[in-house]
Amino acid sequence: MNPGSIAVMASGRGSNLAVILDAIEAGSCPVDLRLVISDRAGAEALTIARRAGVPEVVHISPKQYADRAAFDAACADAIEAAGCQWIVLAGYMRILSPSFVQRFAGRIINIHPALLPSFIGADGVGDALTYGVKLSGCTVHLVDEVLDGGPILAQAAVPVCDDDSRDSLHLRIQQAEHQLYPATLTRIVTTGFRLDGRRVIWLKP
């Protein structure tokens, strides 16, 4: 298995997927993107992946499986069959089952639009704005069985302006995401890290 091989799981517009593909094309993110999976047939992420020539691009419908664990097992089988070392979540809107997380323990990466551990959950942007913080941002983290609770790989802060709406703050956070995610994936496959409890210790090049 290529240590730089990845599968991307996405549900929507695929903006982070597009940025990762652009970085691969530019030679600045040396990962081997072998597989894109979406749980939604109409996800723009599938179109983006096909246009980019990703070797395997598949829609796996949750409706075809008895429960979440069975659906996740089908996704996991596809990931292993494609020989992927890392699973990268890019706007994937389903909570992963414990069995999936355990099967790929320490190998699932997600990006969250807030500075964890603050503002976990589906609306990190809106929750941060409502709370009144002056700094928000994004977090790349490992996925474990706790929602948005895995060890933190990288973070980027963005200011919250007095006249921000949810949309304007989200746009600023997305701009930070689009820099942080491919840069962190590059660091994972070129440098690596170890865990000291919850702390991610990056190895020296």
Image (cartoon, grey):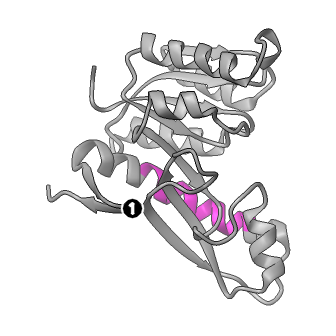
Determine whether 36 is above or below 27 in the image: above
Residue pictured at 55% horizontal, 76% vertical: 157
- Give the image quarter of residue 57: top right
Q: Position of residue 78 (x, y in %)?
A: 52, 13
Which residue is more in the foreground, 42 or 93? Answer: 93
**Secondary structure mostly seen in the magenta stretch:** helix
Q: Quadrant of the C terminus?
A: bottom left
Q: Is residue 176 magenta?
A: yes
Is 109 placed left or right of 196 in the picture? Answer: right
Determine whether 1 is above or below 199 in the image: above
Residue extent of the magenta highlight: 170-182
Determine whether 65 is above or below 13 in the image: above
Which residue is more in the foreground, 50 or 70? Answer: 70
Residue pictured at 61% horizontal, 57% vertical: 112
Residue pictured at 54% horizontal, 25% vertical: 52
Hey, what amino acid is under mark 1? Arg
- Give the image quarter of residue 131: bottom right
